[in-house]
Amino acid sequence: MKIEETFIKDLVVVEPTVFGDERGYFFESYSKTKLEDLGINIEFVQDNQSFSKKGTLRGLHYQNPPFAQTKLVRVLEGEIIDVAVDLRKDSPTYGKAFSVLLSAENKKQLLVPQGFAHGFSVISDTASVMYKCDQFYNKASEGGIKYDDPSLSIDWGMNLDEAIVSEKDQILPFIDNCNSLF
């Protein structure tokens, strides 16, 4: 397992070591010990899984303290553009977005720390996404940022006029008006 740093402090891509042969492949998708050896000490308490069809865009979501969540996101089937936006007001990268292609094929994962909004778009026919969380979901703490906020300049890998977006996500505020407490 190795870690790829991004231009945003604490936001990292995790790449497992994959063992393959004529039968297929094997890899550890999560190892508390191996992550700790890499300096990542997180106690995950909940796994979430979603299934979406091509053109679906979910996010950008976050939970405010004390229920803020760190997420370890991976794709079980298909391909997504995974996006994290830094909401930490005293961070030099506040308001900056990072995106990465996560797929069942590349097996990469994105570790999204507390203090970030998170979302993804489905660019394959379908995608199954699973992510670990270090805090339980708390409805009263949820917040979000509108996916097409012009100040974020996010390339979702699709025509946004054709995106399948929930009603809830369509009415989220831009970052300047979000209720982030980070």
Image: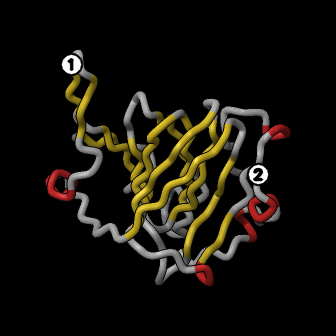
148 with respect to 101 (left or right): right
Amino acid residing under circle 1: Asp
Q: Is residue 82 visible?
A: yes
Q: Residue furthest top?
A: 22
Instruction: Measure the C-alpha gap from mark 1 to mark 2.
Output: 40 Å
Residue under the point 67% across and 66% down: 144
Q: How far across and how far down the image is residue 160, in percent?
A: 79, 40
Residue where numbered disc 1 is placed:
21
Image-quadrant location for residue 162: top right
User: Number of marks in the image?
Assistant: 2
How packed mark 1 is, by other alpha carbons closer than 10 Å (few <14, some 14-19, many 20 or more), is few
Q: Is 18 left, or right, of 48 in this rendering?
A: left
Determine the secondary structure under disc 1. Answer: strand
Residue 90's place in the image compared with 100, above or below, is: below
The residue carrying mark 2 is 165
Q: Is residue 62 above or below residue 56?
A: below
Q: Nearer the viewer, residue 135 or 10?
A: 135
The circle on residue 86 is none
